[in-house]
Image (spheres, rainbow, N blue to C red):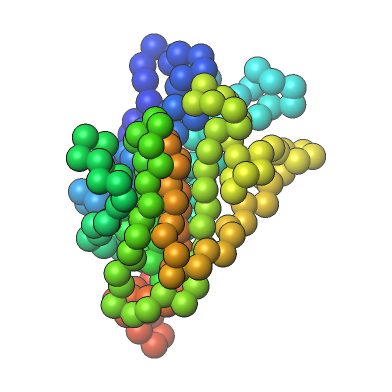
Amino acid sequence: GEGGGIGSSGVGAVSNAFWSSIFFADTLGNLAKNGQQRFLRQTLAGGHYGLVNLTTVPPSVNPDYYTGLLFARLMGVRVLATSVAQEPAQPEFPLRSYCHCARGAGGGVALLLINLHQTQAVNVTRLQLPRPIKQLTVYRLQPERDLHSTSVRLNGAVLRLGPGGALPAMVGVPHDPGQPLLVGPMDIVFAVAAGSVPACAAAPGETLPVGG
């Protein structure tokens, strides 16, 4: 598939801002859930919907770049069924949840959780997997200031390119799997549970397929 968040070069502070990442993350999860194997973003640079912003000195990248990068790094090619128990219940704004075998982590799963409510946080109270979760690593994306921000925070730290356009370190933080996982208003949360699903473990000598 090929897609962009908006047509006609987009809208400043919307399609190049954190607003767009909410829908971009949901699109990636939903397409994979429905069998789409590849997704091409239109466009890399240009307008207000590009992943790279060439109007800044030095060039920078928009929130969708980091959202897509985490999806590609963490979410593997095997898609699993998922459901969540959330508090408080929000039938009008259900928490979007997607689950894949984790990329590069034998037997692990990667979750993508998106809270579409603009004021109400959600506690994910249970993660039920075939095996007890021993380790949970969380990657929480939030806007630097508000939804119109063109810069993004990962676990509270603003992501900025380094010298020569080097990507910043994008490291998750440990979370006690016995405690509720808070997903704040309009948060995008990736969570990787190591070694929890036998179906995600490669058989001896097998290499799990890798997709871009």
Please name the residue shown 49% across and 42% down the image.
67
Judge from the rendering whether residue 166 lies leftward or rightward of residue 151; answer left or right: right
Task: Measuring from the top left, give residue 65's x and y in whole percent.
Answer: 53, 37
Identify the image quadrant of residue 151.
Answer: top right
Please name the residue shown 27% across and 56% down the image.
84
- As drawn, which residue projects farthest toward the front? 88
Please name the residue shown 42% across and 36% down the image.
186
Please name the residue shown 38% across and 26% down the image.
5
Q: Nearer the viewer, residue 174 or 51?
A: 174
**Which of the image's four quarters has the N terminus?**
top left
Task: Measuring from the top left, give residue 143's x and y in whole percent.
Answer: 55, 33
In the rendered view, tell whether residue 169 sits above or below residue 201: above
Task: Measuring from the top left, give residue 191's x and y in whole percent.
Answer: 45, 58
In the rendered view, tell whether residue 9 sits above or below residue 155: above
Q: Nearer the viewer, residue 140 or 54?
A: 140
- As drawn, which residue projects farthest toward the bottom? 204
Judge from the rendering whether residue 141 lies leftward or rightward of residue 38; answer left or right: right
Judge from the rendering whether residue 48 lies leftward or rightward of residue 77; answer left or right: right
Total numbered circles: 0
Identify the image quadrant of residue 30.
Answer: top left
Residue 72 visible, this orientation: no
Residue 165 visible, this orientation: yes
